[in-house]
Each structure stands twice: as structure tokens, then as C-alpha cells.
Image (spheres, rainbow, N blue to C red):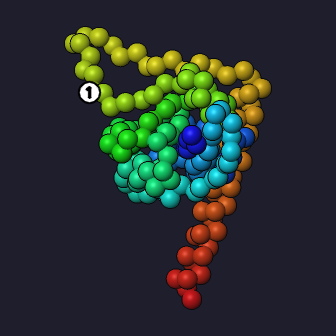
Amino acid sequence: MVEKIVVASQGLGGLDDYVSPVFARCNSFTVVEVEDGHVLEVTTLNNPSKLAPSGAGIQAAQFIASTGSKVVIAGNFGPNALTALSYMGIRAVTAAYGFKVREAVEKYLEGSLQTRGIRPPMVPAPGLLQVPSYTPTLPKEKEIEMLRARMGFIKRRLREIEDRLKELGEKEEG
């Protein structure tokens, strides 16, 4: 049976891109079709909700539903996105910071990634401090590689924004 797995991607997408630390405002989605543990097809889709002024989580969840996927992988999911995905029957799965899309899909197929669900809010007992969650550090080489990829993505996004501002300026004047 063919399974579609959507991975929130930091850059332009693809198996060698990095998993985005965020779901709703990631740059792109990589759709990986697998059967019996083998990749059949990889498609990249631009995230139409990445620049939404509000409601990006719900919009991104609706977009994922339109792909027919029942699984989405990202570094983290906001509460609205989690709720929307859950109601649409889509599993939200988290991947560790620094994973490439290929690694995240492999880990998901092995069953070693955590599925996120809707949980009631936790209220700490009075007087207890909340301890931030621990994020493991990456090996230096892997972190440098990931940061360079992220820097390239930010530079591309900045060029896109500058080009769009120029287009808008020309249209307003013309």
C-alpha cells in the first residue's frame, strides 16, 4: 500500500532539505510517497500559508489535507495546527532539530518518531517552576551544514521579498 508522508521543509524541499523547525510557516512541503519502505516519488510544494497574517496553522493543515496525506512531519506544531490536523485525521509527527527530510522519513517508517496529539493544557502546581524542554545539540559539522542551508534559504527569501517590493513599487507608480 502506498503511503504519502508530508514533511515541512526549511528550504526548497526534497529529500536532502532539512525538516523545518515549524510546521505552519515552513517554506515548503516535501511529499514523499513510499511503499514497503521504499521511496516511490518525491514532490515539493510551496507552502501557501507561510506569509499568512494569521491562521497559518489551520491553513497549512487544510493544505496538507488536500494532498491526501495522513501523516505530516515537522519540528514543532502550534496548538491550532495540531487541533486542525487531528480533526482531519492527519497524524502530526515531530522530528528532531537538524534532521534531513530523508532521515525523518526513515525514522518515521522505523516507528522511532513521536506522534503529537491534542492534550488538555497542563497547569503547573503553585510554586513549581516550569523547566524548558531539552533540545539535544548537534555535532559541530552537522550544525554548520544546517546553519549554512538555513542562511541560503533566508537569503533567497530576502531576494524574493525585495523583488516583490520592486514589483509593487512599479505597479503603484505606473
- Residue that appears at 35% across and 16% down: 130
Whether residue 152 is visible, yes or no, is: yes
| Circle 1 residues within 10 Å: few <14, some 14–19, many ≥20 | few
- Residue that appears at 60% across and 76% down: 167
The location of residue 37, given as percent across then percent down, is: 65, 32
Q: Taking 35 as reference, is 126 left or right?
A: left
| Number of callouts | 1
Q: Taking 37 as reference, is 52 left or right?
A: left
Residue in front for this viewpoint, 108 or 98: 108
Circle 1: residue type: Pro
Decide: is 108 above or below 55: above
The location of residue 36, given as percent across then percent down, is: 64, 34
- Residue that appears at 57% across and 29% down: 108
The location of residue 78, given as percent across then percent down, is: 40, 38
Name the residue tied to disc 1: 120
Extreme residue in the front direction: 1
In the rendered image, the quadrant that contains the N terminus is top right
Residue in front for this viewpoint, 156 or 92: 92
Decide: is 19 above or below 108: below
Extreme residue in the bottom direction: 174
Q: Secondary structure at mark 1?
A: loop
| Quarter assignment of residue 32 | top right
In the rendered image, the quadrant that contains the C terminus is bottom right
Extreme residue in the right direction: 141
Extreme residue in the left direction: 126
Whether residue 63 is visible, yes or no, is: no
Residue in front for this viewpoint, 153 or 46: 46
